[in-house]
Amino acid sequence: MPQRNLKIAIQKSGRLSDSSIQLLKKCDIGFDNGHGKLRSRAYNFPLEILFLRDDDIPQHVEDGVVDCGIVGENTLIEGNANVATIDRLGFGKCRLSIALPRGQEYEAATQLSGKRIATSYPQMLRKFLNENNVDADIHTISGSAEIAPSIGLADAICDLVSSGNTLFTNGLKEVETVLESEAVLISRNNVSSAVKSVLDSLSVRIRAVNAARENKYILLNAPNDRLTEIEKLLPGIKSPTVMPLAESGWSSVHSVIGIDDHWKIVEGLKAAGAEGILVISIDQMIR
Ligand code: PRT
Ligand code: ZN
């Protein structure tokens, strides 16, 4: 399959920049991301990286200025660009929420009728309001929505929230979630087979990195008479690897476990007689 350089756009500077760069580096793609750079060519993978404002990325992907890009789903959906979502990337997680001044009682979306809601996401907010049969006045602003109620510009806001600190310090409370968002890899529809071939290679690497992040490699020594019990605690990719130790009556057991419950599994293994338990991070995992 002929290959040509794939062009990817990532955010130049902002909340998605570091994670996007780290993701490509964990895919073993080497490039110079020196301060102020606008474009960079990978030296060990057919990839050219363009550093752009996040809002411009979906349109540039649709127009073919770049072949693919990393952008928040919120930006993608609001911009309504005609592109394909290839992978969800697990970082840049946030939600687009409607928030009201904290003292106000809130029970249902119908209470938003007649209110002025300030937002940088008018399309998504309009859709949410229509779906909930709410007739509210959308006030489109370009940023700092959280101060709109306190300066009398709006009764409510619809903005991105991650920790909730910004809402809290501005005396606001979240009452409705319009969208759960995270960074996604997007590509132009109908890319050529030469571009698709590189995009597929990149996607395989990204999935391997993301799968690795969700798992740990575990090694332990197990007394043979407790092996059945220990194996039940370790599903592995297929099943755990069991090898005899030099010391008779003992085996070495290797497996892969999910990151969310690995401490619970380790406690179970110890209780079942496992010794010398090592838990190791995985770089890449290809299923
Ligand atoms: O310059 P450029 O246009 O490229 O960047 P930008 O300023 O438009 O975007 P940026 O860097 O702020 O955010 C890029 C993307 O990060 C967003 O489109 C989201 O997909 C994602 N993201 C994740 C967030 C947040 N979390 C987030 N918390 N984007 C913005 N926020 C803001 C939010 O608007 C609010 O002001 O953070 C504040 C709330 O944060 P908490 O933690 O106090 O709740
Ligand atoms: Zn932006």
Image (cartoon, grey):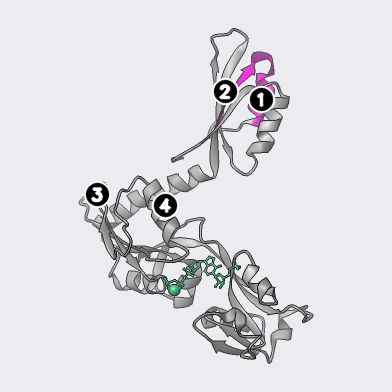
Q: Name the amino acid type tagged 1.
A: Ile
Query: Closer to the camera, 85 or 181?
Result: 181
> Mark 3: few, some, or many residues within 10 Å (few <14, many ≥20)?
few
Residue 139, magenta (yes or no): no
Q: Which mark is residue 43?
A: 3
In the picture of the structure, the residue carrying the numbered disc 1 is: 230
Residue 230, magenta (yes or no): yes
Residue 44 in view here: yes
Mark sitting earlier along the chain (4/2): 4
Which one is closest to the eye, mark 4 or mark 2?
4
Indicate the quadrant where residue 64 lies.
bottom left
Calculate the distance from the C-alpha at mark 1 to the C-alpha at mark 3. 45 Å
Calculate the distance from the C-alpha at mark 4 to the C-alpha at mark 2. 31 Å
Q: Locate residue 174 relative to residue 205 in the image: left or right.
A: right
Mark sitting earlier along the chain (3/4): 4
Query: Closer to the camera, 18 or 88?
Result: 18
In the picture of the structure, the residue carrying the numbered disc 4 is: 23
Q: Secondary structure at mark 3?
A: loop
Are the residues tagged 2 and 3 within 8 Å (C-beta)? no
Q: Position of residue 223 (x, y in %)?
A: 65, 15
Q: Name the amino acid type tagged 4.
A: Leu
